[in-house]
Amino acid sequence: MKERLVTPGYCFIIAANFLQFFGFWLLIPVLPFYLQETFKAGSTTIGLVLSCYTIAALGIRPFSGYLLDTFARKPLYLLAYFIFTAMFGGYLLAGTLTLFILFRVLHGLSFGMVTVGGNTIVIDIMPSSRRGEGLGYYGLANNTAMSIGPMTGLFLHDAGASYTLIFGCSFCACLVGLLCAWSVKTPYKPAVKRPPLSLDRFILLKGIPAGISLLLLSIPYGMTTNYVAMYARQIGLQAPTGFFFTFMAIGMAVSRLFSGRLVDKGKTTQLIRFGLYIVVVSFFLLSGCIHVIQWSQTACAVIFFGIALLLGIGFGIMFPAYNTMFVNLAPNSQRGTATSTYLTSWDVGIGIGMLTGGYIAEVSTFDKAYFFGACLTILSMLYFNLKVTPHFHKNKLR
């Protein structure tokens, strides 16, 4: 008999995760316009400001894994969630770009802790035999938020809503999410002897090869989530770009319904490999949209949204598989470290993607940035096939 997956605690943590990411994603496509209109920032400056968030999250993630493995997880998770929520109000108080950057850094620090905490707690409260499936549904909350959030933010912006209203929507969503997080009942975690400080308490050393592969993938992903609306405007695409995120999330939602179960059946590396093939093709197509639109506006719109769907399917297949790969390379006492290494690898690439995407667009055009990103996905695919797969099968613990 299958162990029960859906419990009140699992539902609350999924709701908390959804509302947190809804608030996060609602601002993602709007912030470049906010910085441009409010502070008159250029593309390079926008990339630097946006990447502060990811750099801060990256800086705290290894330490958050150590803290979550050593101390009670729920109090740390709730504290980080509270700070994360409060920072949406902080943005509205930022009268200068310097102050905005300071709040952005604080927001990134709290995000780094709250995401590791949520990911670790959901692993704690679900049966290990259904971990891949459970992580798939947990990630589906992110994907749903990614569908509704950016679309809502762009529609509000295009409809002339004030930035106060847009930031307020994010704040309210996360406030409700904080209440859901408070309601999660976590299993008792007895006091443990604090492990001595060493590199493997902050980074899962056996997860480094998988982390490199994931990092290379997240660079073009970071470019896409932050600049795809500006790319569409640059090439003259007359289409509601908010739907790009909707189609991307639909693809992720569909793939998550079966990918988690296949992970539980031991198909981890096969799923990642299949997802990589889809993502490689998608990013090359995205960089080519600038040429397609010169031929047909309609054809370009169809391809543009089709790419979003394919990207969603590809990443939706890979996310639970990569997450499970890191967890299966670590002992139970290092679940937090495994999760933080997984998310740190992702964040490094996202930060690089924000910086390089903005820089390449400033000196050239966004299509060149996406072509560069597409080349990186090929490197990721080759490295995964030649290095990561044999390393995982040799070192996995379960």
Image (cartoon, helix red, strand yellow):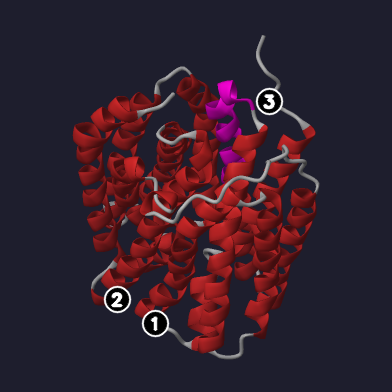
For marks 2 and 3, the one nearer the N-term is 3
Q: Give the residue at mark 1.
A: 42
Left or right: where 323 falls relative to 146:
left
Tell which residue pokes out farthest to the top in this image.
Answer: 1
Across and down, in percent, residue 347 comes to 42, 57
Distance in Å between CA atoms under marks 1 and 3: 48 Å
Distance in Å between CA atoms under marks 1 and 2: 8 Å
**Which mark's residue is nearer the viewer, 2 or 3?**
3
Place residue 348 in its image quadrant. bottom left
Q: Give the residue at mark 3.
A: 5
Query: How many C-alpha atoms fall within 10 Å of the one at disc 2: few (<14), some, or many (≥20)?
Result: some
Secondary structure, magenta segment, majority class: helix
| Residue contact between numbered discs 2 and 3, judged by CB atoms under 8 Å | no
Tell which residue pokes out farthest to the bottom in this image.
Answer: 96
**Which mark's residue is nearer the viewer, 1 or 3?**
3
User: In the image, is residue 2 above or below residue 36?
Assistant: above
For marks 1 and 2, the one nearer the N-term is 1
Distance in Å between CA atoms under marks 2 and 3: 48 Å
Label 3: which secondary element: loop
Left or right: where 154 falls relative to 57:
right
Position of the C terminus, as image quadrant, is top left
Which range is magenta?
127-144
Tell me, for residue 286, which label it has, or none. none
Whether residue 252 appears in this view of the structure is: yes
Badge 3 amino acid: Leu
Label 2: which secondary element: helix
Across and down, in percent, residue 120 comes to 58, 43
Task: Determine the residue positioned at 46% across, 53% down.
Answer: 196
Q: Give the residue at mark 2.
A: 362
| Residue contact between numbered discs 1 and 2, judged by CB atoms under 8 Å | yes
User: In the image, is residue 373 above or below residue 227?
Assistant: above
Q: Is residue 128 magenta?
A: yes
